[in-house]
Amino acid sequence: MDMLAETSRTFLIPISRLVPGIKEAVASAYLCMRAIDEIEDHTDLPPEVKAKLLLGVSKLIQVPSREAELRTLFQPYQDTLCEVTVRLNDWVNLCPTSIAPRVIQSTAIMAEQMAEWVEREWKINTEEDLDYYTYCVAGAVGELLSDLWKWFDGTETDRVKAVAFGRGLQAVNIVRNRIEDSTRGVDFFPPHWGIEDMFAYTTRNLEMANEYIADIKPGPILDFCSIPLALAHGTLFALSNGESKLNREAVLQIVSRITGED
């Protein structure tokens, strides 16, 4: 869990509250996705190197000699890549063996799609482009989580709403990080969209995400989904009121309300 603490405060708490089995599966999935996300977002790697690495991961993570092949792929960039990336094989090995193939499959597909977006220079021209991008990097994670829930205890969830769950969280990040993204020449807002258009898009998806978790019975899986969703709602509210992010006190209040812990 040390790497989780270093990479995401948002997901550290809900993952740490999961029970054994599903905890390792979700942690593995999160860290695998984070490993490739750090390649896509890396400020010191040129686009052609990002695409090469992402396509390499997509292929090599699926082969029996994965550990050695990934080490060779990453070696020339060892001093540049983040630790969470170079330890990708460790995160695969963290996953319970019976569900690991699904996590590997999702990581491979996402890495390939991220490479596509790198080559497209993240150009968003329409709402359909935005839907596709947010599906590739987040909506598909919602689908994976639904598969993990079913694997663990048979929990059934709506996959369309699962996509909206991931997409809504990603849309909040797009709004929050717009200025930072602009410094690297990227804007995920479709042309002619203002902030209110993106707020409306985000709200629609978060409302579907509310419906997604409403179908989940009380327990650790519901807690896991509820925390980041509540933080997303809180962040969107803060952004709509001119704040740059959700402050720490508000974060703690939201987590306390959901967990019942002070």
Image: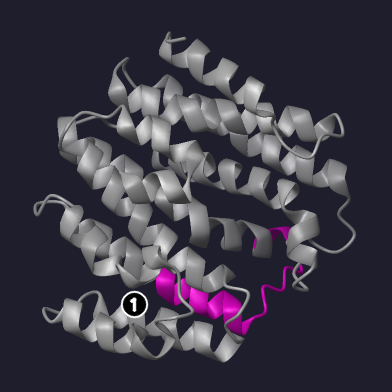
Q: Position of residue 164 (x, y in %)?
A: 53, 42
Q: Residue 128 appears at what percent x and percent y?
A: 67, 61
Q: Amino acid at mark 1?
A: Ser
What's the magenta region?
Answer: 110-128
Q: Is residue 148 above or below residue 216?
A: below
Of 137 and 27, which appears nearest the observer? 27
Question: Is 153 or 27 nearer to us in this picture?
Answer: 27
Determine the main secondary structure of the stretch shown in magenta: helix
Residue 113 falls inside the magenta stretch: yes
In this view, the residue farthest toward the front is 79
Residue at 59 percent across and 48 percent down: it is 170
Q: Classify residue 68 as left or right of residue 235.
A: left
Q: Which residue is mark 1?
A: 58
Residue 219: quarter of image: top left
Picture quadrant where residue 149 is located? top left
Q: Looking at the picture, tell me which residue is in the foreground, 118 or 9.
A: 9
**Residue 89 vertical placement versus 259 (above, below):** below
What is the x, y in percent for residue 195?
A: 85, 46
The local crowd at label 1, few if under 14, some if 14 to 19, many if 20 or more residues have their Cα within 10 Å, is many
Give how far across and how far down residue 154 sits, in percent.
18, 31
Q: Where's the N terminus, which quadrant?
A: top left
Q: Residue at x 49, y 39 (%)?
A: 9
In the figure, residue 191 lies in which quadrant?
A: bottom right
Residue 142 lies left or right of residue 196; in this view the side is left
Q: Residue at x 34, y 78 (%)?
A: 57
Q: Secondary structure at mark 1?
A: helix
